[in-house]
Amino acid sequence: MRRLFPVSPVPDPTVGPGGSETDREWSLAELADAYAYPEPDGDRKTWLRANMVSTLDGAAQHDGRSQPISSAADMRVFGTLRALADVVIAGAETVRQEGYRPARVRADFAEARRAAGQAPVPVIAVVSASLELDFSLPLFTSPLVPTLVLTGAAAAPERIAAAERAGARVVTAGDGVGVDPARALGALAELGHTRLLTEGGPRLLGQFVTAGVLDELCLTVSPMLTAGDAQRIAGGPAVAVPQRFALVSLLEEEGFLFSRYRRD
């Protein structure tokens, strides 16, 4: 993995003896340093980053899933970002399409999570207005830490009861049938989750963008073309004024670009 755009103060492990640049696979520890969450700043309670993948022609999926446009290096970054987070936020449709399972313990990150005061694995938080989820799945019945379900106050009581019977913790983060993005982040902060990661899908990411609460985007650009009518990484209503993000780092491996942008 080659660093194309330097990030200070993280050392550049692609520079070998005598200053020559080397191509090699970064270790998980080096990736964790490169993608570390920023230190708390003032009154900011949470830091929300998104991790998404897109083809050259803007497709966030192929045949409804992100795996066909991903790579082994992309999955290393994916695993690292999860290991750094307190909670992983995903929309209900993404949970269904991608077959979400409970987060697993990763021995490489176990000590770092203990030192940071984190649970052994990140919590999975599912955003759903209808709560039309299969609560018999392992994501709800057998996670190492209880799965959260974020929903609105108008959610059907019988669906809330079904979620709670399965072992999930239901969190109300909206006055109507849906979830208010800012309230969702506040509710997660109250539970002690401040290092937040969303994996979409596009509709959920679009809601975070529109609400102005996204702090960082980790975007993998896949060197593939798919055509078709696949979704972009973010969907829904457009913002009134485009939001500008600043490039923080750029890595490359086998034609895949791993970019990291922060809100200006």
Image (cartoon, rainbow, N blue to C red):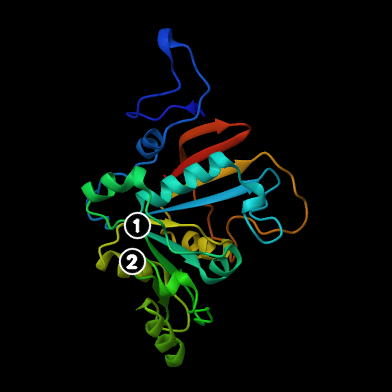
Furthest residue in direction top, as rendered: 18
Where does the image place residue 180, in percent across and percent down from the top left? 42, 73
* Figure quadrant of residue 48: bottom left
Where does the image place residue 31, in percent across and percent down from the top left? 41, 37
Instruction: Please tell me whether mark 1 sits on a helix, a strand or a loop.
Output: loop
Q: Which residue is mark 2?
A: 145
**Horizontal side, residue 109 vs residue 25: left or right:** left
* Figure quadrant of residue 174: bottom left
Residue at 45% across, 92% down: 158
Instruction: Please tell me whether mark 2 sits on a helix, a strand or a loop.
Output: loop
* Residue 222 disc label: none
Q: Amino acid at mark 1?
A: Val
**Horizontal side, residue 24 vs residue 153: left or right:** right
Q: Nearer the viewer, residue 101 or 183?
A: 101
- For the residues labelled 1 and 2, the Cα–Cα distance comes to 7 Å
Q: Which residue is mark 1?
A: 121
Where does the image place residue 43, in percent across and percent down from the top left? 23, 55
Where does the image place residue 201, in percent across and percent down from the top left? 56, 62
Residue at 64% across, 56% down: 232
Q: Residues within 10 Å of mark 1 (few under 14, many from 20)?
A: many
